[in-house]
Amino acid sequence: MRNVLVIGGGAAGMMAAVAAAEAGAAVTLLERNEKPGKKLYITGKGRCNATNDCTLEEFLREVPRNPRFLYSALTHFTPQDMMAFLEAENCPVTVQRGRRVFPSSEKASDVIRALQRAMAERGVQVLLNTRVTGLLLENGVCAGVETEARGQIRADAVIVATGGLSAPATGSTGDGYRFAEEAGLALVPRSPSLSALETADSWPAQLQGLSLKNVTLTLTQGKKVLYRELGEMLFTHFGISGPLVLELSCHLPADPKDCAVSLNLKPGLTPEQLDARLQREFAAAPKKQLRSVLPALLPGSLAALFPALCGVSGETPCAQVSRADRAALARTLQDLPIRIQGLRPIDEAIVTRGGVSVREINPATMACRRVPGLYFAGEVLDVDAHTGGYNLQIAFATGRLAGAHAALGEAPSTKNEG
């Protein structure tokens, strides 16, 4: 019987432990915290969007970087497999808007309990308050780990599932990257993903708390459109956030030079329809000032700021609004520029972009190509996706694949399988 160590008791780690035990290994999970699943507990605002009930092709379209790397993992353990796993572990699930899958109780703790129950049923030993300080590398082979309190623990295989750098209070402090460096693996620079954005403009802060629905946010670099989507966004004290902004952040280049963000407040109207709408509003209240009419088109707080954003006087009577001013209003309603300062700090991000280069990992097994006995799974890898349950499914699927193959103990692959 092979001995398998799993470093990290998050989504990827617990699922890896379950899979390795099912494949016949003696499995020990090492968790630095006093309990497993601390980051899982806060996902989806405590509701835990565990996966997304979509097809493989649809899933891969939601992964901005290295989607093909996930083909084997997502084929081995599909979103539907994850749903069946939870149901089998007495955690019923519900499919909600956008095919997002939640525990029917809408409690992340039920997903954690399901994973803990699965580990216990399969005989996984869980060592809490056990921090791994390094890998035990002997003649180029991973032979176990070094720990703070327990010294060396030897094993036939080690799975690194330590998470990234987001939510460090849950234990994700980047240890896995250090382990990868010890093993001589290439790392892709880390940065926030699914992150709110700080703005160079001050006016978004004046709208703090305002949520917009059915608007379109566009990210361009030069003439190239990197992202454009319809949805919801939120103004904050530092800039902008909300579903659209988080998703847009996945597409922001490492060097955002020449990048621009624009907001279409009226995406359902053609320019001609919007101009006709403005003319009707002005004709219906010719004596009112422009600022008094704009709330018919925009939320009050935004309407108060809007004339200044267009370079138009809000005190102008509607009957006296010039054609040029009306054109400026219409143009800004459908193309309001938002100057971006940058991403919020990585510890506030939902997930981490970058990490262990996928070129170092065999996508068919999650084994390290150059170091026998070493596997990686979850957020520590250079793979991240949009919101909607995709990132957790990546963690579960890569963990499942790593666990199954760590228990079998194949030799590392040197072939580049993409």
Image (tube, helix red, strand yellow):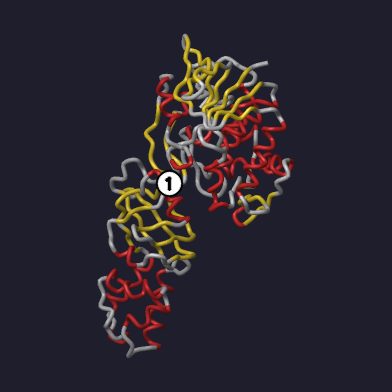
Q: Is residue 373 above or below residue 167?
A: above
Q: Position of residue 268 (x, y in %)?
A: 48, 67
Q: Residue furthest top?
A: 139
Secondary structure at badge 1 equals loop
**Residue drawn at 71 percent across, 49 percent down:** 92
**Residue drawn at 56 percent across, 42 percent down:** 392
In this orientation, does residue 232 appear? Answer: yes
Question: How many residues crowd mark 1 within 10 Å: few (<14), some (14–19), many (20+)?
Answer: many
Q: Nearer the viewer, residue 235 or 116?
A: 116
Three-letter code, disc 1: Ala
Residue 203 picture quarter? bottom left
Q: Position of residue 252 (x, y in %)?
A: 38, 46
Q: Nearer the viewer, residue 148 or 326?
A: 148
Which quadrant is home to the N terminus? top right
Left/right of residue 17 with respect to residue 230 in the rendered view: right
**Residue drawn at 63 percent across, 46 percent down:** 54
Q: Position of residue 234 (x, y in %)?
A: 43, 61
Q: Nearer the viewer, residue 253 or 106?
A: 106
Residue 178 picture quarter? top left
**Disc 1: which residue:** 349
**Residue drawn at 42 percent across, 22 percent down:** 185
Left/right of residue 302 with respect to residue 381 in the rendered view: left
Left/right of residue 142 with respect to residue 187 in the rendered view: right
In this orientation, does residue 69 appear? Answer: no
Q: Is residue 149 above or below residue 196?
A: above
Q: Residue furthest front?
A: 149
Q: Nearer the viewer, residue 409 or 278?
A: 409
Q: Position of residue 309 (x, y in %)?
A: 29, 69
